[in-house]
Amino acid sequence: MDSLTTIRRKIDALDAQLVKLFSARAKIAQQVGKIKNGKGIYRADREAQVLRRVSAINPGPLPASSIRRIYVEIMSACRALEDKMTVGYLGPQGTFSQEAAIRHFGGAVTTRSCATIDEVFKLVETAATGYGVVPVENSTEGAIGRTLDLLLATPATVCGEIMLPVQQCLMSKAKNLKAVKKVYSHAQSLGQCQRWLARHLPGVEQVAVVSNAEAAVLASRDAKSAALASRTAAQIYKLNLLARNVQDESRNITRFLVLSREDVAPSGRDKTSLILSARNVPGAMQDLLTPLKQNDVSMTRLESRPARTGRWDYVFYLDIEGHVQDKNVARALAAIERKATFVKILGSYPATFVR
């Protein structure tokens, strides 16, 4: 017992030191805010550098992911001392989009629920919110078409990405699976859980809705229905968790993009997203991509999407490693622009960790 008391006193002493250090850090952050004069409170490049540095110097036993979570919240609280930040997300409350926004910006940020992905884009474009978080692709079900279509036309830029492991749960007012006659969820989530649904709820009607949280709302109104959503949604809408982690792939990750109206400086490990179209001639796509190889630029993603011209035209969405200010990336993009019929740089931003 004496030993336990001694250890607790050591913990109390360390906590006292930590509180003083946190306060000292916050005061310095306030000084930075005064120098910025309310502009550029959120610096994606700087925060990415901080998270990478604390991960690198972490001696354990806490995993690097835990250290990063702590520092996300520290930086979020310090930002709140400088100015109020609002982030739009696909709602209602309890969606994976909201979870992604909070994991990226921290709990001190103000989040604003949007009924559709279109509304998230509009809030950022009109400066009604400083930032927006939208899903862009899932490791199981692929791209989110609506997000890709809106990226083609928006004046907003991409200033960040979030990789969120998605754990789907089945929830209902019902007490067991036998009572469930209908399952609501976003189309992507239904697709992510097809094998589980076929095995455990064969023949049950599946209804696609605008978001997982909306599915939870509908399930809360009907004891014979269920929803595929997050555990957070089950808590918010007071639903019983009938099954957890029902996604077909254990490594089910959704990638989100962070929208803003600001460009991001290089962080040292970045991605650049762009859209382009090629001439309708043999080898045109190969010609467009050749400058990437010639300048040692790695492409991490290539996605095609109808250009919505009604003429069977397509645009291509690319993610490449590096920042537009990197010399090799700048040379590659300049060569691509000379060959493409259309090029739009969506933004350069820090490559992120799986959250």
Image (cartoon, rainbow, N blue to C red):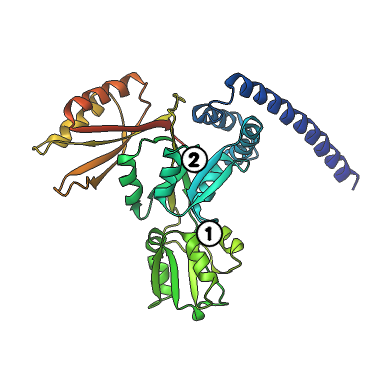
Which residue corresponds to the image point at 27% horizontal and 20% vertical from the top-left?
Answer: 331
Occupied quadrant, residue 110: top right
Residue type marked 1: Ser
Residue ranking furthest to the right: 2
Residue type marked 2: Ala
Occupied quadrant, residue 123: top left
Q: Which residue is mark 2?
A: 128
Residue ranking furthest to the left: 282
Which residue corresponds to the image point at 47% horizontal and 42% vertical from the top-left?
Answer: 132
The residue lying toward the viewer, choosing from 241 and 195, is 241
Q: Position of residue 175 (x, y in %)?
A: 58, 77
The residue lying toward the viewer, choosing from 225 and 85, is 85
Q: Secondary structure at mark 1?
A: loop
**Numbered circle sitting on residue 114:** none
The residue lying toward the viewer, choosing from 45 and 140, is 45
Q: Are marks 2 and 1 in contact (CB under 8 Å)?
A: no
Q: Residues within 10 Å of mark 1 (few under 14, many from 20)?
A: many
Do we see residue 256 in this rendering?
no
Which residue corresponds to the image point at 44% horizontal and 29% vertical from the top-left?
Answer: 262
Q: Which residue is mark 1?
A: 230
